[in-house]
Image: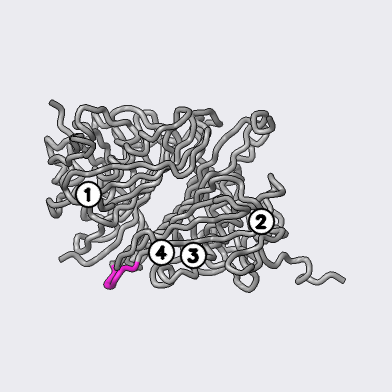
């Protein structure tokens, strides 16, 4: 008999000295020898949360640039302080795998001092995850649990919306934080370009999230829509929420190639 | 001679009167800093024609109003994409940095991005975003929604009656970056009891803007943790073309 614990994917990475070994969940669906973008965001944000500057402040911006396919080999992540200040710090990170720098990231950390102005009104997404239809965007075997609230065709405003939860540990024994889940949820932009898949591939070159408060909880909701103007890239606009309401805006730059070109 | 924000002199950029910060007069304003950094990224060499897809500008440290050196470095080069960093130095010390993602000029699917419902700039009232940008200022703005002391959404048109660097026409991309830097003037998240400098500016381009005027439609997310975001949608005369975000850090005004 197979138990849930046996079929449920457990972790994206396992620790290996000062680095990590990628497991099956990290494998790109397009290139079997490379890691997927979700795994890159997860491991870079996981490493960031161990930084003292991150722990002492709030994340205001996280930008991930995917420089090249990241070999699914031993991976190291190094963050350094690029700007140190009393209220604002800038951290820069590099992900290296298989001997190449495959991704870079920056994190803007703020440490505001009270008093703070009164919060503007906020509201949670209309349908909480427990009431959302159990329509998955990707299989749960990816380590991500997804609940599609509305496809672009179903939504009056043309914005696709879904809830995302990272069900597997990022590193064995370390479950995803709300920051990591937000980055994973912001990686779904290409799913809004499904109708063009016959003619175009559209991998994302980056993920950037701009935070207006600290995200909370296991589930993150993203409502998103691409701005595609015939120029070779689309900018996907994500509005990110948790159970308490909006906490960030995020973008991905999708790069288009003709399917024939991509195959050549 | 047309007015300018900077004059190029002996490999440095001398900030001129329009580049002066309104608060201290000893520093360069963020609009000029963002423009000069973006220009430097656009000037980076490339094998094929490239256009800016994203620029992220760090503005946490004030740049002295003094001869400024601008440098760019290619962090990742490629035929299709390029990642370029830029920095501004005064007396050898770095005060502001930026990272730009550039992509080659190709094709892709098109979807109607929707259009704003504001009057075109020629028909908009001659009301500036702030008093600093009054009649005669080289950065000409026309506010069509919102006000400095009303938390909530706002919108304004911007055009420039000045060069960024004297004698050189600034690209529409540079002018778009400079335009949205002042969005806090119409879409702040708190009353006048608070000060809220923006410590960064990120701009995303789904296409290269065109024309003289840029429309910034801005709103503010501020949820009581002492920081927040201004979220802007950018348009030119042809329609929407991008987004911008600024992190605001709030403190009680003196």
- Within the magenta stretch, is there residue A100? no
What label sits on residue A73 in the rendered view? 2
Q: Secondary structure at mark 3?
A: helix
Whether labels 1 and 4 belong to a single chain: the reply is no
Q: Chain of mark 4?
A: A
Q: Secondary structure at mark 1?
A: strand
Q: Position of residue A219 (x, y in %)?
A: 57, 64
Q: CA distance from mark 2 to mark 1?
A: 43 Å
Name the residue rendered at 18%, 51% in the picture. B64
Is B130 left, or right, of A52 in this rendering? Answer: left
| Camera-nearest residue between B202 and A214 | B202
Q: CA distance from mark 4 to mark 3?
A: 18 Å
Residue named by callout 4: A213
Instruction: Using the rendered image of the protein, determine whether residue B137 is visible from the camera's viewpoint.
Output: yes
Give the magenta part as a residue range.
A111-116
Query: Of circles 1 and 4, which is in front?
Result: 1
Whether labels 3 and 1 belong to a single chain: the reply is no
Whether labels 3 and 2 belong to a single chain: the reply is yes
């Amino acid at each position: 008999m197979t138990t849930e614990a046996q079929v449920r994917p457990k972790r994206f990475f396992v620790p290996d000295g000062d680095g990590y070994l990628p497991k099956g969940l990290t494998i790109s669906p397009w290139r079997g020898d490379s890691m997927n973008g979700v795994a890159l965001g997860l491991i870079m944000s996981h490493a960031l949360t161990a930084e003292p500057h991150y722990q002492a402040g709030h994340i205001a911006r996280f930008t991930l640039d995917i420089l090249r396919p990241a070999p699914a080999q031993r991976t190291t992540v190094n963050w350094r302080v690029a700007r140190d200040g009393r209220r604002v710090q800038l951290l820069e990170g590099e992900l290296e795998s298989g001997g190449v720098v495959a991704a870079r990231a920056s994190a803007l950390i703020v440490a505001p001092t009270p008093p703070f102005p009164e919060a503007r009104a906020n509201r949670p997404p209309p349908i909480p995850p427990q009431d959302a239809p159990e329509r998955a965007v990707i299989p749960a075997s990816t380590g991500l649990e997804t609940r599609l609230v509305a496809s672009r065709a179903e939504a009056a405003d043309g914005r696709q919306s879904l809830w995302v939860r990272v069900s597997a540990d990022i590193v064995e024994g370390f479950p995803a934080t709300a920051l990591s889940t937000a980055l994973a949820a912001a990686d779904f932009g290409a799913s809004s370009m499904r109708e063009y898949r016959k003619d175009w591939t559209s991998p994302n070159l980056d993920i950037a999230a701009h935070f207006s408060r600290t995200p909370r909880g296991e589930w993150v909701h993203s409502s998103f829509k691409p701005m595609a103007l015939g120029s070779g890239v689309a900018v996907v606009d994500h509005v990110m929420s948790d159970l308490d309401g909006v906490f960030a805006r995020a973008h991905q730059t999708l790069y288009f190639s003709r399917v024939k070109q991509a195959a050549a | 001679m047309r007015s300018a924000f900077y004059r190029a002199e002996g490999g440095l950029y001398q900030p001129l009167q329009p580049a002066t910060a309104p608060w201290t007069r000893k520093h360069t304003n963020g609009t000029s800093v963002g423009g000069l950094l973006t220009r430097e990224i656009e000037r980076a060499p490339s094998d094929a024609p490239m256009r800016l897809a994203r620029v992220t500008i760090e503005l946490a440290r004030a740049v002295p109003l003094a001869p400024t050196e601008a440098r760019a470095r290619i962090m990742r080069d490629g035929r299709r994409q390029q990642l370029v960093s830029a920095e501004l130095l005064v007396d050898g010390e770095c005060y502001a940095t930026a990272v730009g993602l550039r992509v080659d000029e190709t094709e892709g699917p098109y979807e109607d991005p929707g259009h704003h419902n504001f009057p075109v700039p020629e028909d908009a009232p001659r009301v500036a975003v702030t008093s600093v940008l009054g009649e005669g200022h080289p950065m000409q703005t026309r506010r069509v929604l919102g006000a400095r002391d009303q938390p909530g959404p706002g919108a304004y048109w911007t055009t420039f009656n000045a060069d960024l660097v004297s004698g050189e026409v600034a690209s529409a991309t540079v002018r778009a970056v400079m335009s949205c830097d002042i969005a806090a003037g119409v879409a702040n998240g708190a009353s006048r009891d608070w000060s809220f400098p923006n410590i960064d500016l990120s701009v995303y381009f789904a296409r290269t803007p065109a024309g003289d005027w840029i429309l910034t439609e801005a709103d503010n997310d501020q949820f009581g943790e002492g920081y927040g975001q201004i979220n802007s949608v950018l348009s030119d005369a042809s329609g929407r073309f991008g987004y911008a975000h600024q992190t605001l850090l709030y403190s009680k005004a003196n």
